Image (cartoon, rainbow, N blue to C red):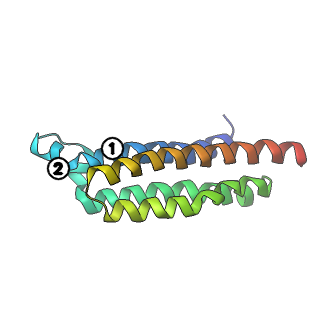
Amino acid sequence: LTPPVATASVAVGALITAILVVNNYRDLETDRRAGKRTLAVRLGRRGTQIEYAALFVVAYVVPPVLWLAMQMSPLVLAPWLTLPLAVRLVRTLAAATDGPTLNKTLAGTAQAGLFFSLLLAAGIVLGTFLG
């Protein structure tokens, strides 16, 4: 496991975790009433919104770290193309309380994670071959 691989995995892991956070956020009130002690219940709505945003921040910090600190190709910055989607998702989660909107946010988060990961992998592979 090399440092660049470990660093890249942090970004992907953060976005996968964000999927779980949306799911727990959507179920927060029913979990609270049922006596469940999920992290979302413990953090509350605002704390979970901050957690969700922080996971995106972590993910989007990784490509510049790979480029600048680990001297990888600037092609590793390709995941930044998904930043508008990430911003929209964070804003939606902060404003949404209804199930249908949160279900769309859940799907959008999975989509953002997929696109980010594909672009990161493509940037790493192309950067390796193109120098």
- The residue at 66%/55% (across/down) is 63
**Gap in angstroms between the C-alphas marked 1 and 2:** 12 Å
In the picture as drawn, the residue positioned furthest to the right comes out as 130
* Res. 71 in view: no
Q: Quadrant of residue 81?
A: bottom right
Residue 10 horizontal/vertical position (percent): 55, 45
Above or below, 38 relative to 52: above
Query: Which amino acid type is shown beneath numbered disc 1?
Result: Asn
* Res. 56 in view: yes
Number of the label disc, if any, that sits on residue 23: 1
Residue 36 horizontal/vertical position (percent): 16, 39
Q: Secondary structure at mark 2?
A: helix
Residue 75 horizontal/vertical position (percent): 77, 54
Callouts 1 and 2 close, C-beta under 8 Å: no
Number of the label disc, if any, that sits on residue 76: none
Q: Secondary structure at mark 1?
A: helix
- The residue at 53%/46% (across/down) is 111
- The residue at 88%/42% (across/down) is 129
- The residue at 11%/41% (across/down) is 35
Q: Quadrant of residue 23?
A: top left
In the picture as drawn, the residue positioned furthest to the front comes out as 100
Residue occupied by mark 2: 29
Query: Which amino acid type is shown beneath numbered disc 2?
Result: Glu
Q: Residues within 10 Å of mark 2 (few under 14, many from 20)?
A: some
In the picture as drawn, the residue positioned furthest to the top comes out as 1
Above or below, 39 relative to 54: above
What quarter of the picture does the N terminus occupy? top right
Q: Who is closer to the viewer here, 104 or 34?
A: 104
